[in-house]
Image (cartoon, coloured by chain):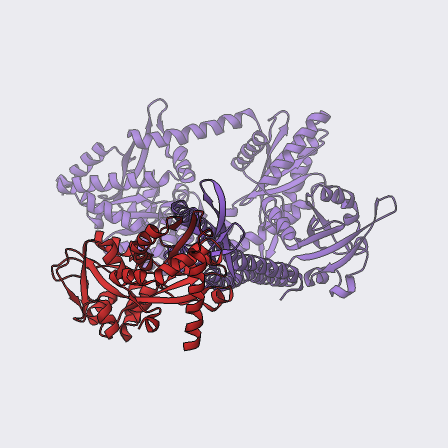
Chain colours: A purple, B red
């Protein structure tokens, strides 16, 4: 039993006893009182009745009534007495007994008297005595029951509050135990301080009087080592700084929260202070070191590029905005340099992303070494870097920096024992001339960078309004191309491929054309690359494939010669996981024969997807589809795939054919390609044949098929159909 | 015993002589008499006869107080003479009361006049008192008129048989019983109550002639003769009680009662006078 609960226990006992005693005594007392009053009333009533009877006897014999003992005695004897013995006495005026009843009344008893009269003159007294024993017996019985009841109630009054109290105490102890355990085991440090005041009542000092193990571990090792020490010594000056605020707030009952760093240690704590009692301050120390570090990490992740450690796009925008604001205030200018590595995509594709990542890290390191400390270099993503140069003097400065950045990348990079030569293109936009906000400046620098790439790469280019116009045009083309697909502005032309030996049409390459409603025919060079970049190549490629297959079916059904129809497929299409399924569904949908369809892939497309989706594409050969390599010899040629992949045709790029009659090198290349294809039993096709000399050379070298303006330009569907029909009739 | 009787008789003669001496009784004197109802009924013809020869003595006889009450009144000086049916108590004797047995009269069992019955047995009485017998042969409810427990009539009846005491106590314990305190109350109540049953001295029956049926007991008709003969068991004593001081008028009345005329009148009214019987004989 808790010591503190003893007074409460005693009070409950006293109350229970008091109430029980009250019940034990009051019930029989009340019963006796009521019963006695009732008896008195009964006796009085009986006296009235008997007195009247006696009076009538007196009146009947006023002289001698005193001697009518027998009559009076009989009268008294016969009085109603509800079964309880009563002793009646009639006395005359002198007190002498005139008559008595014979019944015996046991003590203790009560007596009631009433004067008897003779015509209004008092002549005697009537007494009735009745024993109190019956009432006492019943009172005793009542007392017995009330005592029993009081005893039960005593136990109830005592047990119930006791049980409640014990339950409360138990719960309190459990709670205390729980909180003590929590206090002992909680990760947060908990400390209790005593506030000492000086004579004037002002704050004097703060002493630690209790600390849980976590607190001790945070600040000293074990509670004994820190308890009793000055709190400021333990918790540092931050604690001291907050003491006045702490005390002011604690007086008002409010808690105080602040962060502190332990002096000399890289630990951070969130401190919650409150006052559990007057003159005491409790502090809860939450170790937020980890969360602080995590915050820093998150901040770093949010504002810095994880690969290079350079500021990312978000931080760069913040910096550039600050720089613009500064330049605006100081009436100075700044430059945004947009740097993009040339052909970085190819490096990634060919050498792998890890090499690409290493390259980016090294590039960022080199670039950092060539900018001032107050300038900002950031990586926006991929191989795009951007630099903000502040406090520009003259334009020459920017040019100098741009060239320095380009030069810094010129030196070869060495990875895994291999040297890698990389160049970069830089676009430059100036504030305030080329834009007055971050977005515009970056966009214009980006445009300038593209312009630099278009003009030969490995150089820098300043933004000009013309670039903006070109970019707008490009945007217009993109929108137009989307609409072209929807509005049916695209159509297919077929360029026949002739068998070199016979001069007959053996195949035709499908070429997409765009007839713009306002601008007229737009050459493929203006929209194919755009379609590639914007992803529109996917619906465009599907359109071409469906159109070709539809024509194939129609012409086959029409009895025209069954030749091959070549469809160019871009790398983006191959990258689609479901490309073979798409081809299958179009064939099924149109009813075209797979053996008339030839898929043309570029070398780079093959190389890029050789480990992933090429197997699926070549799997289509099982349906009868043939595979041709387009623009052979121009890409990242790797003869390995020619050896391993079941290629049906290779198409010698027109760049080799154009000068084949004049260039010894081109002749050698063409001869080599043709010889190789013959040896590997791969059919070859020469593109871009425009002259008889070219044709004769190729025929001499055993070229299988010829494609070019010498025979036919790309023809409309109807013209090609007519041509094909003509050949069919000849055959 | 014989000596004592002679002395008492001499004393009475002496008193009588003094009373009848001319000059002494010249003024009208009053003698107040009370006592047992039966005895007082006996006194009525005696007083009438006494008054004829003693005109200066006025005998006042109020309604009966009963033997006990009358003796008390006598000792209190409220009466001159008491005719009692009870023996004196020692304390009454101590206070100067003197008693002289005058005679005996039968205690007769009486019923309401419509009760068609002439005899009753002790067993029937017991049954009636016990409550076992509750109706007369004619179907009428037997309504018992009882006397107080201390009354001599009750005591006489209780001695009738061993079972009577219990039977009478049973009857007394019953609620709603009719109690007649005095003899006149008893026979008047019986006479007025349908199916009434009670007891009273023969003197009252002869003198007052109440309209009741007299019942023989166990086949024995009540009379001084059957009483003296011992066949009738219920005998009620009549005695003369005087106080410490007896007036001459009272003595004159006593003398008359003891006179042959008085005795003859008493006998005629159902009393077997025993006082002085030996002397007369």
In the rendered structure, the answer to whether residue A467 lies left or right of residue A391 reads left
Q: Is residue A701 visible?
A: no
- Front-lying residue, A523 or B181: B181
Q: Is residue A711 visible?
A: yes
- Quadrant in which residue A438 is drawn: top right
- Residue A511 coordinates in the image, percent (x, y): 31, 37
In the rendered structure, the answer to whether residue A377 lies left or right of residue B46 reads right
Most extreme residue toward the right is A199
Please name the residue shown 24% across and 49% down the image. Answer: A584
- Residue A500 coordinates in the image, percent (x, y): 27, 46
- Residue B92 coordinates in the image, percent (x, y): 47, 64
Please name the residue shown 18% across and 70% down the image. Answer: B220
Quadrant of image for the C terminus of chain B: bottom left
- Residue A251 coordinates in the image, percent (x, y): 73, 43
Quadrant of image for the N terminus of chain B: bottom left
Question: Tag count in the figure?
Answer: 0
- Front-lying residue, A69 or A340: A69
- Front-lying residue, A169 or A173: A169
Q: Is residue B198 above or below residue A585?
A: below
Please name the residue shown 23% across and 55% down the image. Answer: B190
Q: Is residue A93 above or below residue A2?
A: above
């Amino acid at each position: 039993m808790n010591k503190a609960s003893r007074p409460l226990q005693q009070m409950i006992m006293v109350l229970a006893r008091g109430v029980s005693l009250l019940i034990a005594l009051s019930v029989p007392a009340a019963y006796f009182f009521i019963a006695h009053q009732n008896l008195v009333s009964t006796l009085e009533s009986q006296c009235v009745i008997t007195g009247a009877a006696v009076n009538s006897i007196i009146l009947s014999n006023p002289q001698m009534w005193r001697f009518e003992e027998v009559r009076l005695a009989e009268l008294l004897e016969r009085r109603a007495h509800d079964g309880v013995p009563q002793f009646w006495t009639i006395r005359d005026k002198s007190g002498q007994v005139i008559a008595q009843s014979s019944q015996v009344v046991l003590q203790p008893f009560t007596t009631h008297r009433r004067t008897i009269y003779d015509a209004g003159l008092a002549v005697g007294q009537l007494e009735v005595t009745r024993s109190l024993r019956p009432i006492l017996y019943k009172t005793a019985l009542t007392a017995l029951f009330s005592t029993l009841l009081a005893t039960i109630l005593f136990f109830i009054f005592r047990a119930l509050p006791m049980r409640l109290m014990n339950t409360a105490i138990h719960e309190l102890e459990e709670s205390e135990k729980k909180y003590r355990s929590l206090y002992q085991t909680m990760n947060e440090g908990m400390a209790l301080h005593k506030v000492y005041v000086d004579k004037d009542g002002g704050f004097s000092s703060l002493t630690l009087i209790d600390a849980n193990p976590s607190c001790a571990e945070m600040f000293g090792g074990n509670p004994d080592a820190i308890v009793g020490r000055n709190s400021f010594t333990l918790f540092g000056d931050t604690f001291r700084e907050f003491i006045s605020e702490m005390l002011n707030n604690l007086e008002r009952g409010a808690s105080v929260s602040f962060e502190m760093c332990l002096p000399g240690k890289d630990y951070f704590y969130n401190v919650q202070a409150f006052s559990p009692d007057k003159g005491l301050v409790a502090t809860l120390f939450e170790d937020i070191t980890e969360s602080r570090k995590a915050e820093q990490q998150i901040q770093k992740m949010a504002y810095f590029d994880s690969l290079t450690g350079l500021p990312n796009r978000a931080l760069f925008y913040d910096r550039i905005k600050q720089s613009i604001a500064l330049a605006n205030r100081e009436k100075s200018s700044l430059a945004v340099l947009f740097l993009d590595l040339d052909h970085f995509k190819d490096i990634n594709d060919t050498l792998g992303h890890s090499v690409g990542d290493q390259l980016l890290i090294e590039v960022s390191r080199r670039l950092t070494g060539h900018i001032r400390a107050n300038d900002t270099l950031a990586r926006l993503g991929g191989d795009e870097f951007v630099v903000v140069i502040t406090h520009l003097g003259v334009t020459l400065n920017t040019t100098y920096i741009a060239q320095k950045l380009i030069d810094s990348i010129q030196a070869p990079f060495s990875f895994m024992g291999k040297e890698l030569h990389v160049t970069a293109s830089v676009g430059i936009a100036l504030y305030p001339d080329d834009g007055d906000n971050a977005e515009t400046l970056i966009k214009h620098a980006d445009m300038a960078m593209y312009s630099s790439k278009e003009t030969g790469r490995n150089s820098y280019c300043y933004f000009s309004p013309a670039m903006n116009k070109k970019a707008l045009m490009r945007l217009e083309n993109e929108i137009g191309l989307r609409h072209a697909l929807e509005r049916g502005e695209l159509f297919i032309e077929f360029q026949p491929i002739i068998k070199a030996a016979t001069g007959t049409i053996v195949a035709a390459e499908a070429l997409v054309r765009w007839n713009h409603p306002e601008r007229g025919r737009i050459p493929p060079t203006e929209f194919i690359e755009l379609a590639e970049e914007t992803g529109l190549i996917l619906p465009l490629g599907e359109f071409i494939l469906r159109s070709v297959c539809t024509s194939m079916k129609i012409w086959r059904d029409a009895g025209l010669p069954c030749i091959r129809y070549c469809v160019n497929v871009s790398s983006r299409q191959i990258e689609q996981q479901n490309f073979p399924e798409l081809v299958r569904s179009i064939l099924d949908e149109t009813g075209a024969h797979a053996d008339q369809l030839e898929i043309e892939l570029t070398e780079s497309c093959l190389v890029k997807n050789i480990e992933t989706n090429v197997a699926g594409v070549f799997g289509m050969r099982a349906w009868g589809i043939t595979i041709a390599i387009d623009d052979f010899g121009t890409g990242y040629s790797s003869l390995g795939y020619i050896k391993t992949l079941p290629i049906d045709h290779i198409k010698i790029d027109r760049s080799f054919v154009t000068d084949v009659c004049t260039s010894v090198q081109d002749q050698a290349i063409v001869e080599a390609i043709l010889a190789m294809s013959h040896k590997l039993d791969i059919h070859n096709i020469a593109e871009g044949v425009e002259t008889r000399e070219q044709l004769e050379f190729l025929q001499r070298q055993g070229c299988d098929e010829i494609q070019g303006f010498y025979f036919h330009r790309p023809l409309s569907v109807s013209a090609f159909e007519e041509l094909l029909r003509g050949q069919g009739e000849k055959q | 015993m014989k000596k004592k009787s002679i002395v008492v008789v001499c004393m009475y003669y002496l008193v009588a002589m003094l009373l009848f001496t001319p000059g002494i009784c010249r003024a009208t004197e009053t003698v107040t008499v009370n006592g047992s109802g039966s005895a007082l009924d006996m006194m009525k013809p005696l007083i009438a006869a006494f008054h004829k020869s003693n005109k200066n003595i006025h005998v006042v006889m109020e309604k009966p107080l009963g033997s006990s009450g009358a003796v008390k009144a006598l000792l209190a000086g409220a009466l001159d003479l008491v005719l009692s049916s009870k023996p004196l108590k020692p304390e009454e004797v101590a206070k100067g009361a003197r008693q002289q047995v005058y005679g005996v009269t039968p205690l007769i069992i009486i019923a309401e006049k419509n009760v068609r019955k002439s005899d009753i047995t002790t067993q029937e009485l017991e049954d009636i008192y016990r409550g076992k017998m509750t109706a007369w042969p004619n179907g009428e409810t037997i309504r018992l008129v009882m006397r107080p427990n201390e009354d001599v009539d009750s005591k006489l009846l209780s001695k009738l048989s061993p079972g009577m005491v219990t039977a009478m106590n049973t009857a007394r314990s019953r609620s709603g019983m009719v109690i007649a305190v005095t003899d006149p109350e008893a026979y008047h109540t019986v006479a007025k109550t349908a199916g009434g049953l009670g007891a009273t001295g023969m003197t009252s029956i002869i003198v007052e002639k109440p309209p009741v049926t007299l019942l023989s007991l166990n086949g024995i008709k009540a009379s001084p003769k059957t009483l003296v003969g011992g066949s009738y068991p219920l005998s009620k004593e009549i005695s003369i009680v005087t106080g410490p001081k007896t007036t001459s008028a009272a003595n004159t009345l006593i003398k008359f009662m003891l006179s042959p005329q008085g005795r003859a009148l008493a006998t005629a009214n159902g009393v077997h006078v025993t006082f002085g019987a030996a002397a007369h004989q």
